[in-house]
Image (cartoon, helix red, strand yellow):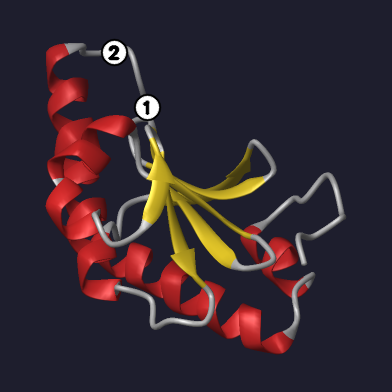
Amino acid sequence: MESNRVGFSSIDEYIATFPAEIQVILEELRATIKTAAPDAVEKISYQMPTFFLKGNLVHFAAFKHHIGFYPTPGAIEAYKDELSIYQGAKGSIRFPIDEPMPLQLISKIVKSRVAENLKKAETKPGKRK
């Protein structure tokens, strides 16, 4: 069920390519990220919805059986105990579509990514906007 469209210009456009039940999940995820990172900018990067704040914070994407969430390897390591029930790889997590999204956990991960990016930006003034 991956979107077969290429060249999205917005997260709205990306989400609109999926069936209604998947759109609901993606919008919940998007709202959770927005709440956790209110100053982040939405964009499309790597053809995935991305939130950016002094660098990429997180990406997400819908697939046939899961929602992929990409917060960086460091964030996955920091929450490895809570994420241990999900499949994933070094920089990704797979949340099954047929299970409730762990929105509180996602919020914690996003908030930690915000703190990480802001701290990095302080140590490298002028490097990222």
To which quarter of the image does residue 101 belong?
Answer: bottom left
Is residue 102 shown left or right of residue 4? left
Residue placed most toward the observer, 5 or 9: 5
Residue placed most toward the observer, 58 or 68: 68
Question: Type of residue at label 2?
Answer: Gly
Q: Residue at x 70, y 87 (%)?
A: 20
Is residue 22 shown left or right of residue 102? right
Neighbor class of circle 2 (other Cα within 10 Å; few <14, some 14-19, many 20+) is few
Q: Residue at x 31, y 53 (%)?
A: 39
Residue 9 at x, y percent in the picture: 74, 50
Q: Residue at x 41, y 46 (%)?
A: 88
Residue 77 at x, y percent in the picture: 19, 37
Q: CA distance from mark 2 to mark 1?
A: 7 Å
Is residue 8 shown left or right of residue 76? right
- In the picture, the disc for residue 68 is none
Circles 2 and 1: CB atoms closer than 8 Å: no
Name of the residue lying farthest toward the right: 5
Q: Say above or below: 101 vs 40.
A: below
Residue 114 at x, y percent in the picture: 22, 44
Considering the numbered disc 1 on the image, is that residue within a helix, a strand or a loop? loop
Residue placed most toward the observer, 41 or 13: 13
Q: Which residue is mark 1?
A: 129
Residue 21 at x, y percent in the picture: 64, 88
Q: Say above or below: 7 vs 25.
A: above
Is residue 16 shown left or right of residue 32? right
- In the picture, the disc for residue 126 is 2
Question: Type of residue at label 1?
Answer: Lys
